[in-house]
């Protein structure tokens, strides 16, 4: 368990308003920071009319209000409203990142690049095992599908992003506020504790893997990580990184497949991303052998 020092508490008070980036006008509902808030209702009145959330990081609390103007009393009043469970769960999950734990059953490991947290995910995990609700319509995909289809890739990025940020309620107004809250809290956690990113490593039903990364400036879209997709046998799946002069050399080596379907998917994906494929009928039928010539990846295949 981490404990904030007095200096960090002071820093929190400074960083939070900056991280939130609030530009609420007198008549726009929104997000109001109020640490150790004595009166969330009074704080909510600062945002003007509309749906408003008062964020208290130090007490780990969200308070929702509908701010309206009472014509008879000739003043604004804040009426309490329930914060959706999805938004509250996301808020608590992001605050827990520095402790390297989101909930029981979730295991985090140090990220291999940058300063961040890695979250292992399986489409069929129950919600509390991975902290998010996996998009039901995408559970049947595999890593090849994601690499080959821009449509699937976009749907996955947006679906995981919405699940992470809590922007998957049935109410558009709350979805918008959830994105603002998530971005603000992740920025705060980044500045105070150095947790810059959250990386989801999806292990699909067939055993293949896809990586997506969330950052404070894009909490509602988990961006695909090029060069990190592998199939069930551990073969790196070619994507934009394979045809990039800075990263293509990493695809050099031999590839081995246990079934014709994955082999053909690998060849099709390599073609799609501009990898030079050469047929070598005399080569061993184990799989492609790839070499880097200093500018381009060349792969010989047995048929």
Image (tube, helix red, strand yellow):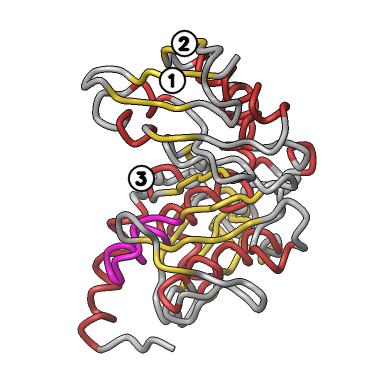
Image quarter where the C terminus lies is top right
Q: In this orientation, does residue 68 appear?
A: no
The disc placed on residue 111 is none
Q: Is residue 265 left or right of residue 35?
A: right
> In the image, which residues are magenta?
185-198
Residue denoted by label 2: 278
Query: Residue visible at 65% across and 63% down?
Result: 130
Report helix, strand or loop for mark 1.
strand
Q: Is residue 263 left or right of residue 240?
A: right
Residue denoted by label 1: 299
Q: Residues within 10 Å of mark 3 (few under 14, many from 20)?
A: few
Query: Residue visible at 29% across and 73% down?
Result: 12
Rendered location of residue 263, percent (x, y): 64, 27
Q: Residues within 10 Å of mark 2 (few under 14, many from 20)?
A: some
Residue denoted by label 3: 23
Rendered location of residue 77, percent (x, y): 58, 61
Dot 1 or dot 3: first in sequence order is: 3
Q: Residues within 10 Å of mark 1 (few under 14, many from 20)?
A: many
């Amino acid at each position: 368990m981490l404990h904030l020092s007095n200096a960090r508490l002071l820093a929190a008070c400074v960083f939070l308003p900056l991280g939130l980036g609030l530009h609420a006008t007198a008549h726009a509902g929104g997000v109001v920071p109020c640490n150790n808030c004595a009166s969330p209702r009074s704080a909510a009145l600062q945002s003007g009319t509309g749906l408003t959330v008062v964020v208290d990081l130090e007490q780990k609390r969200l308070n929702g209000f509908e701010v309206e103007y009472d014509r008879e009393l000739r003043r604004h009043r804040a009426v309490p409203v329930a914060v959706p469970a999805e938004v509250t769960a996301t808020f608590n999950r992001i605050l827990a990142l520095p402790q390297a734990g989101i909930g029981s059953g979730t295991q985090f490991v140090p990220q291999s690049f940058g300063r961040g947290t890695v979250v292992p995910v399986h489409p069929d995990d129950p919600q509390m095992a991975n902290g998010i609700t996996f998009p039901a319509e995408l559970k049947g995909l595999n890593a090849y599908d994601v690499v080959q289809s821009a449509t699937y890739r976009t749907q996955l990025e947006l679906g995981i992003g919405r699940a992470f940020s809590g922007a998957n309620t049935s109410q558009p107004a709350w979805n918008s506020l959830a994105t603002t809250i998530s971005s603000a809290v992740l920025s705060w956690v980044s500045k105070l504790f150095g947790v810059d990113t959250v990386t989801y490593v999806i292990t699909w039903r067939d055993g293949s893997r896809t990586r997506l990364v969330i950052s404070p400036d894009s909490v509602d879209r988990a961006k695909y990580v090029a060069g990190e997709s592998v199939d069930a046998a551990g073969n790196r799946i070619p994507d934009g990184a394979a045809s990039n002069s800075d990263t293509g050399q990493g695809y050099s080596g031999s590839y081995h497949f246990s079934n014709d379907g994955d082999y053909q998917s690998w060849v099709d994906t390599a073609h799609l991303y501009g990898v030079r494929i050469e047929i070598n009928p005399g080569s061993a039928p184990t799989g492609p052998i790839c070499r880097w010539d200093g500018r381009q990846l060349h792969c010989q295949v047995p048929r």
